[in-house]
Amino acid sequence: MKTFFSPASIAVIGASPREGSLGAQMIANLLYGYTGKIYPVNPNHSEIAGLSAFPSVEDIPGPVDLALMIVPAPSVPDQIEACGRKGIRRIIIESAGFAETGPAGRALQERCLSAARRAGIRLWGPNCMGLVDIPRKFFFTFMHPKLYVDGLVPGRISMIVQSGMLSAGFLADLMSERAVGVGKACSIGNKMDIDECDVLEYLMEDDETDAIALYLESIGRGRRFLELACRSKKPIVLLKGGKSSAGAKAALSHTSSLAGNARLQDALLALAGVTPARDFQQMMEVARALAMIGKTPRACRTAVLTFSGGAGILSCDLLEAQGLRVAALSPATRRELAGVFPDWMPASNPVDLFPAFARRGPIAAYDGAFRAVVKDPRVDVLFLHFFVGLYPNYERLKVFKEMADREGKLLVIWAIGRRDALRIFKREAQEAAIPVHGELYRAVECLAFASRYIPRRKTARLLDGGGAYRLPPRAAALLGENRGRIWDEFDGKRLLKALGVPVVVEKIVATAAAAVAAARQIGYPVVLKGLAPDNVHKTEAGLVVLNISGPAALEKAFADLARRMKGRGRMLLQRQLPVEYELIVGLARDAQFGPCVMLGLGGIFAELQKDVVFAPAPLSASIARELPDRLAGKKLLQGYRGQKPLDRKVMAEILTAVGRLAAACPDIEQLDVNPLVVCKGRPVAVDATVVRRMKNDA
Amino acid sequence: MKTFFSPASIAVIGASPREGSLGAQMIANLLYGYTGKIYPVNPNHSEIAGLSAFPSVEDIPGPVDLALMIVPAPSVPDQIEACGRKGIRRIIIESAGFAETGPAGRALQERCLSAARRAGIRLWGPNCMGLVDIPRKFFFTFMHPKLYVDGLVPGRISMIVQSGMLSAGFLADLMSERAVGVGKACSIGNKMDIDECDVLEYLMEDDETDAIALYLESIGRGRRFLELACRSKKPIVLLKGGKSSAGAKAALSHTSSLAGNARLQDALLALAGVTPARDFQQMMEVARALAMIGKTPRACRTAVLTFSGGAGILSCDLLEAQGLRVAALSPATRRELAGVFPDWMPASNPVDLFPAFARRGPIAAYDGAFRAVVKDPRVDVLFLHFFVGLYPNYERLKVFKEMADREGKLLVIWAIGRRDALRIFKREAQEAAIPVHGELYRAVECLAFASRYIPRRKTARLLDGGGAYRLPPRAAALLGENRGRIWDEFDGKRLLKALGVPVVVEKIVATAAAAVAAARQIGYPVVLKGLAPDNVHKTEAGLVVLNISGPAALEKAFADLARRMKGRGRMLLQRQLPVEYELIVGLARDAQFGPCVMLGLGGIFAELQKDVVFAPAPLSASIARELPDRLAGKKLLQGYRGQKPLDRKVMAEILTAVGRLAAACPDIEQLDVNPLVVCKGRPVAVDATVVRRMKNDA
């Protein structure tokens, strides 16, 4: 990958002298800051922008590290072959007209890829804006030079963006206004060869990158992406496009992506420590916050120093709403603050400095308050508010940062004010490595993300659930028998039981008399179920009778169900458990992320809100243990209203067993344990659905 | 109120010639655009800023409509009296040092108020930044003139702000950068006389105001505020500060506010059609969106026209996440779009225009696509994305708006781009009355707020539940008896029953034998409860025995409870109902908003999430009917998994009954029906707590 980012020489295939053409813009961009050799390639010109041009790459005299292509799509395969002959091993194809355009384009893209494979070439693109390295002023892209003439803010946040026009436009916007400094911006387009995982892996090791922000419409190699994210020592922030049905449809036509199961992917990415974003600018601010303040998680007891009482109050509201703590200042700090304030002003957090402005001037007020608060052992974060453009209070940012660093405190800034002054201020803050935000909510939200950021050591063991193991012999035997595509619940639970999952006491009963006899052993109340072949919706079909309290009722229920079943299927008698709450455990298969185990709240909760979590199968021991804690309703599992807490050990065993089955038996298409009833803290499978892919299904 | 906003003459008490002083700034601000007579008042100068100055207001020759005061707090009462003698009837006190500083300041504020009352003067402030009318260039404020030199964007969104420095700073920020045009900005400070209700009422009738945005730390007259909001034909957006405990504490010291019960207030305000905001800038964008696009609610089937496929995809994701619909374009539109696009490009929503740029140029691409989509009967909203500063595509905004208006379609813009061009673009959009946003999420969020905006006719009947009525005689009789402060649940339910609330079948039983006899009538299973005096936590005290299935178990339970009760209190036998789910109905009293009825999900749900709604008591018929629909978990009430839906008529009767009791008996301090069990759709009170304020409590 390094050659893509630091080539010693570049050929531009499709270079052009015509003003406004993409080929001309690409040359102009290279001339802007790239210091290596530039070889324009164009059969009709011998000189372009003062550089010697060549009819073909093969005519270039010296070695070429990287080729940039901006020629019409149909000519790309030939150009790749020419590059191969010339010995070029890295190409960025920025032309469009490939897989995103339909079947013909997809075929063309395939031809490019085989040509490259034959010649040992790595391809970047097509249908992309290439890559930009802002600190080095490398612009390997056809984007319009106007886009960066307003000035660039070099920084240490690098971007991977699947959408071409977006990356260029957004970069320009970011540059011109918002002052989040960017390191490398990588537009990967259709990613026919180089994909987000390749670039992510490179940026994870890049000394000039502190955090990685990604806009992706698809994740091609889901498991690989999770592995990288788990390993990353740098924060990764992901904005995933195409989550909605309409968005996913558009994603297909846009960069020929497949969006996948959004809920499952979100859950897995969260497990791997990836921070989710919801919009472009927010993604950058979150990434910067994580890079600047997210290295060591802290309690985030926050002191607010403000020029506006109202903004101070709202900051406290927002901090609490995000689960962060408003610092209670120590008596010593309050005493020291009292010297800054007029007598009538109580020195408390939020620290409203405006009343002190008149007395000591704004600079002295900020200074005095900052010095007092930064030393307070009860404060972890100083949230500074500035109104910029009236008082020259931003000269002290570097000093503030040094003091905060000495005390091990975090700084976050909210700044509003006059336009030009604000722009300068934001850059000063950026240079002092202090995150600065234009909205209070955003500032607090970023701080909250930083406080929740899971450092590498906690996620590293996510995917170590693998290794060889054997299904228990009884389970293997059951799987060896031919039970058809849809198993009935009794067979499903036999499989679960063989895997070590606790299952409700139950018995197949052939006659009413047998049912009564069995019920005597099981104990009333009992449940009688009619297991009709291929019917997984028993309740809706009227094939479940609950609350049977004695032999007479059981006999009647048996007769009723037998009538409904019309001689098909069989009858199952179960102990009726007193239910505290219900869970659902299941197996899900994702094209990108592979087999996964799902855990969710069941019953009434499943109706009202989808509270589900996922983990990649097979589960690592640590994930199996902690997965229930990732449910939004985890409070329920901790022992609601004095009830027994969920037996976490048994729960982990169930999740592990389902995960192993998912990983070991790819032909188990669906497995649902629903409900997994919890009674006195103990989870018990009460119903199960197993759907198997038959050999003739494929 | 009109005199405050349009005075023919103004006296400035505390005017000063000293540069940088607040008195000098106030004069400079008036000279900036105010066209009436200005009388500086200062005993030491005969001329200030070229105007004749007077030692006292009484020395001013002509009549004075309005006095602005920026003198030290202790001299304010005397100045008010002088104004009274002069015949001035409107004063804006911008000085600080009053109630916000503690008891002495509070006393001073009281003195001001009595002086004003004696003289028939209305007071605005103190501790505020006065008022600004941007279209007229009226600056009745001491804010620094530098704050608006960058230029102002006049608009039709007016603001009411409780925080002084904030209003000035925020205004400057808004003006210099974000281009939300502002009409009147009213900083009301400590609001010792004129409060948010007064200003709101004025702005509701102001021809130059289309929407009202408020930042408040307290709402003094809650009921009045609700009444106004219900009546308002204009959107009201409220950012409420001081919701958190820390924020509320700060609010107390800041503008001497009392924050109140945040959840209750939020629910009532939502009922009254007030749109909640969470941050300053967001509040303004939401208000503008409601003013520009919220007049008629629509289905909001949205078409996205974008320069970036990625932004189009994300827009669809955000639209769906907000519950809005991505428009499915009609075949005719798709055919017409096909003419704009290269052949390979599918013409669908989101409409990615970038591929058409090369073919027809960006202007023609936007134009062609807009013309096609704006006519589509399946489209209600056109969400336009612009990259500004590269192509001059914003000349057409006014034309687009006219076409959209003709077709009855809404326009919303997301714009990013180069700094200066973007600023001009935003103002052009503003002038064309198209809301323009800098972030996709914000744009979609504002559209969602607009789609949910409740127009006046739906909220107008919120507060008409009043009128005289009499409690049923049986209820009145029970209330007439002296049952002490805390009623036991049996008495509580007798009261409920007398009010018409369905109550579980139950009986007080004095002996085990009586219990068995009663149970025979009631039917097993039964519940036995020990009602210990003043104990409202029976379960925790072990005084409830559930699931008693026969006489033997009942006798044992009776003996156990009798032992625990040690001869105090009495024993209650109840039918045990099969529970589908539980609700809670209660009575809440708020200092600002008066008596309210609360409805919430109970049981397991109450543990996991506080899903509660409130309505002002007594309830109007329409609110009693619709209140259950305001629960987040309303799906549960609609008949979960084929169960019977909640009997809405009975539910409305229960809510109405509790509301009447709350309004009619101010000495009922607490009333909780918890649980109100729902069984086959029918709500039944199973437990109740009544706490009465005794005469000696006050």
Image (cartoon, coloured by chain):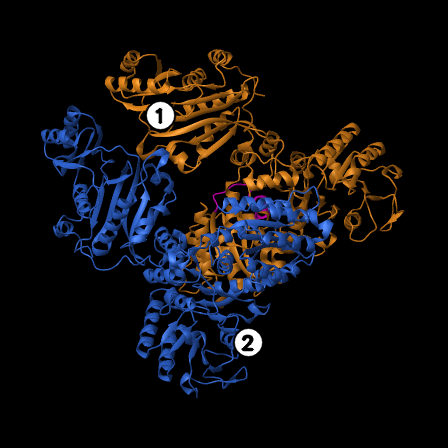
Chain colours: A blue, B orange
Q: Is residue B275 left or right of residue A69?
A: right
In this rendering, is residue A406 above or below B10? Answer: below
At which x and y percent is residue B460? 56, 30
Q: Is residue B655 magenta?
A: no
Tell me the quarter of the picture where residue B84 sits: top right
Which residue is under mark 1?
B542
Residue placed under numbered mark 2 in the picture:
A32
Q: What stretch of residues is rendered in magenta?
A: B282-300
Res. A434 visible in picture: no
**Chain under numbered label 2:** A
Q: Residues within 10 Å of mark 2 (few under 14, many from 20)?
A: few
**Foreground residue, A339 or B75?**
A339
A500 left or right, relative to B344? left
Residue A577 seen from this side: yes
Circle 1 crowding by C-alpha within 10 Å: few under 14, some 14–19, many from 20: few
Where does the image place residue A184, in percent across and percent down from the top left? 48, 68
In the picture shown, does residue B31 fall above or below A105? above
Residue A439 locus on image (x, y percent): 57, 52
Identity of the residue furthest to the front in this view = A332
